[in-house]
Amino acid sequence: MLMRLAFRNLWRNRRRTLLTLSAMVVSSSLLMLSLGVFSGMFDDMLASATEQYHGHLVISKKGYQDNREMFAHFEAEDSPTEKLGGRPEVRGVSPRLRAFGLVAHGSNTYPAEILGVKPRREQQVTNLGRKLVAGSYLSADEQSGAVIGSGLAKRLGVNPGDELVFLTQAADGSIGNDLLSVTGIFETGAGNLDNALVLVNLEWLQHLMVLSGKLHELAITIEQPLRAAELAPGLEAKLPESMEVLSWGQLLPEMQEAIASYDVSRLVLVVILYMATGLGILNTVFMSVMERTREFGILMAMGMKPRTVKLMVVLETFVMGLISLIIGTLAGLAMTLYMQQVGIDLSRYLTAVTYAGGTILPRLSASLVPANILIPAAALLILSLVAGYFPARRASRLKPIEAIREE
């Protein structure tokens, strides 16, 4: 009975109710979309920092990731590559050897990082194979092939098919140098990769550096990147004491802090946006209560208890919140899914920005995260009840005789 009365009372002033409902629907749906876009931005940043270079977990000698010392290597045959690849949570494992030196083409010479990889395994860890803008990815059949960043290719003036000279120090004290044939050029939008990274075959680099059968690290990707810190101690316990497992959060502490602050930022955004919406609901319900003062007086004179009056007014705001929640959630889901599938390309107006070790791409996309839907929806319903409580309290405290006489 009370629910029916509450629903009917809402439409006594259709224009005011519709305006309030519209404000609630728009605020909730846009909030869901905004949170989805923020999640998409963080997903892109995390992917650019981990799936283009580091991976989610890295196994190496203790201290190697701090100074990249050439001799901090381990035997490839002792690495747990196959065992790790068989774990259900692991998506890919890539053995790597790293060198630093000079690459030259014609009269152009620039410093570069040379990363020796097994092409098929590296594609399970990084997405550089999907970032090619020219040529093709590494092939195990062409041992002296190289894939280089677009910025470095531009500085050297090379295209697929051209040759590079690579010069570095070998492990035996000699100067290692050899020719590389450029097979492909990648572009990630991250300057540190595009301007200095060269991918080569692992066996070729091991031979050049006189480090046959040696590795510097194992890069690992997992199905749930945010669980990397949880998995690292368990993996490290099964390795020799001289080895360590670092998660992407340890390799990129600024990125870890940025993502950790997201939950707080999300709550702040919900509070700020819904404060204005709450004032609108409060105004609507207060106006409704003031217009119906005589009605409440008559109802209480006929025997309706004050707590029943209070409950009826609160139910009105609850119904309003429920209607806007359903419509707003559907609209927010639709817009988030659209942005997830299609997005908006802003590359004509903006350039990629590197932040906290990741790259913010010049495009708007969204990620559908349950919390981004549930938190705004729950907050809207709670807001409706809170905003309705104060007018309901005023209505329940009316004195029947005074309320009936009020004009």
Image (spheres, grey):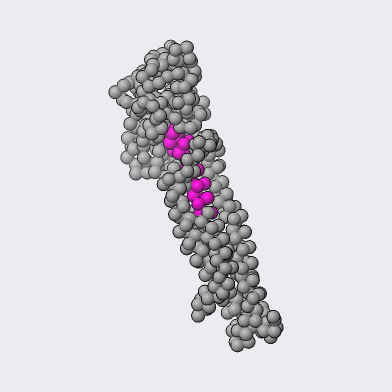
**Quarter of the figure that contains the C terminus:** bottom right
Residue 149 vertical placement versus 328 (above, below)? above
Can residue 228 be seen in this snapshot? yes
Residue 193 picture location, percent across and down = 47, 28
User: Looking at the image, which residue is at 59% across and 52% down?
Assistant: 268
* Quadrant assignment, res 78: top left
Residue 162 colored in magenta in the image: no
User: Looking at the image, which residue is at 47% across and 27% down?
Assistant: 194
Residue 239 as seen in the image, left or right of residue 362: left
Can residue 80 be seen in this snapshot? no
Nearer-the-camera pick, 30 or 126: 30
Q: Main secondary structure of the magenta part?
A: helix
Residue 202 vertical placement versus 3 (above, below)? above
Nearer-the-camera pick, 353 or 406: 406
Residue 52 picture location, percent across and down = 44, 33
* Quadrant assignment, res 398: bottom right
Residue at the farthest front position: 15
User: Looking at the image, which residue is at 46% across and 36% down?
Assistant: 48
* Quadrant assignment, res 143: top left
User: Looking at the image, which residue is at 61% across and 63% down?
Assistant: 280
Please provide the residue range marked out in magenta. Answer: 31-56
Residue 210 picture location, percent across and down = 38, 17
